[in-house]
Amino acid sequence: MEQQKSRCLTSPEIGALWSQYMNDSMVICVLQYFAAKSNDEETRTVIEFALGLSQKNIQDVTQIFKQEGMSIPVGFTNKDVNVDAPQLYSDILYLRYIKHLSTAGMTGYSLSVALAVRSDVRNHFLACNQSTMELDEKVTQMLLSKGLYIRAPYIPLPQEVMFVESPTFMGSLLGKNRPLNVLEIMLISANVSTNAMSRALMLGLSQVAQSPDVREFLVRGQDICKKHIKVFSTLLQDDDLPTPTTWDSEVQGATTPPFSDKMMMQQVTALVAVGLANYGMALGYSTRVDVAADYVRLMAETGQLGEDGAHIMIKHGWMEQPPQAVDRKKLSS
């Protein structure tokens, strides 16, 4: 009996594989459109490499599901993308999007490996992490070679080791605070960049969304990203540090939708999930109380956006339900 259980997928393994199928089926649609509209041959090679990884992931996860006799998620298909639609974003934003994918992918796959027990599932996610690291290297070098990589702020190199000697290091909500430390700068800069990419993506999607509630949701998401960028940028500027650039100018004037409204909502809710995870990690590393308080407040706002997006998806019948535990109470009633 114990050996039979050891061969079964655990709930974290099912969850990780199911989430990967949903995300990669969406990413395939996005990258197919990007590849069709890219005007730069070098950029297209990176897009096609990323596309190949997602297609392989879908094949491998599907094989595991079939072996286990599990149902295959619907996810997203060719019905959710129109590669003949006019270009909505520039090649620069294609690269920024892929950089975001690789960063989120490496984080997610590392967690999936840590939670997986069965050797084939662990090997699958280890391979995914390795290939995503390769993708990240390709897109990073591409951004650097084109002068598009926005580096985080520099600070003078420390010349001596110092220890905190007073609780004033933690700062206060009011009054003067110490300068940001490198961990805080690192995560604030990353969150500015993520919000800038998210805002540009939603700016374009809001131009082409067909449902009024989806369009309104996307406009609201843009405004929230703009507000969060301002909060983080102010923290950097108060210490005379430069702020990462935004990408709004990389959105074209097209109004024909390349994606279904269902897939647009999935893209944004995925961004919200990644944003919440980033804010949670940043909160844990922020020792200045005013910075931590900003993260708590912004997380609440981001979480509310995600909840409202879920309600829209449920209303339209777009939210595919993840596998869940058996409702024993219902069965015994």
Image (cartoon, rainbow, N blue to C red):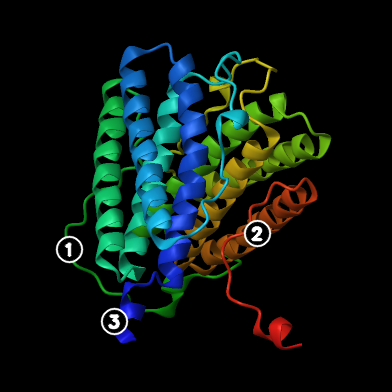
User: What amino acid does circle 2 point to?
Assistant: Gly
Distance CA(mark 2)–CA(mark 3) = 41 Å
Residue holding disc 1: 160
State which quadrant residue 330 falls in: bottom right
Q: Amino acid at mark 1?
A: Glu
> Is residue 178 at least partly visible in the picture?
no
- Residue extending farthest to the right is 212
Which disc number belongs to residue 243?
none
Residue 44: percent from the left, percent from the top? 36, 19
Point out the tag, 2 or 3, that comes first from the N-terminus: 3
> Relative to residue 113, is residue 22 depicted above or below?
above
**Which label belongs to residue 303?**
2
Depth order, front residue of 192/231: 192
Residue 108 coordinates in the image, percent (x, y):
39, 56
The residue singled out by tag 3 in the image is 3
Residue at 65 percent across and 30 percent down: it is: 205
Q: Earlier in the sequence, mark 1 or mark 2?
A: 1
Tags 1 and 3 touching, CB below 8 Å? no
Residue found at the very far left of the displayed protein? 159
Specify the quadrant that holds the N terminus: bottom left
Query: Crowding near pointer 3: few (<14 within 10 Å), some, many (20+)?
Result: few
The quarter of the picture where residue 261 lies is: top right
Examine the rendered structure and indicate whether residue 71 appears above or below residue 52: below
Q: Is residue 212 visible?
A: yes
User: Where does residue 281 sit, x and y in percent of width and height?
Assistant: 44, 63
Say which residue appears at 40% left-offset and 28% top-offset. 95
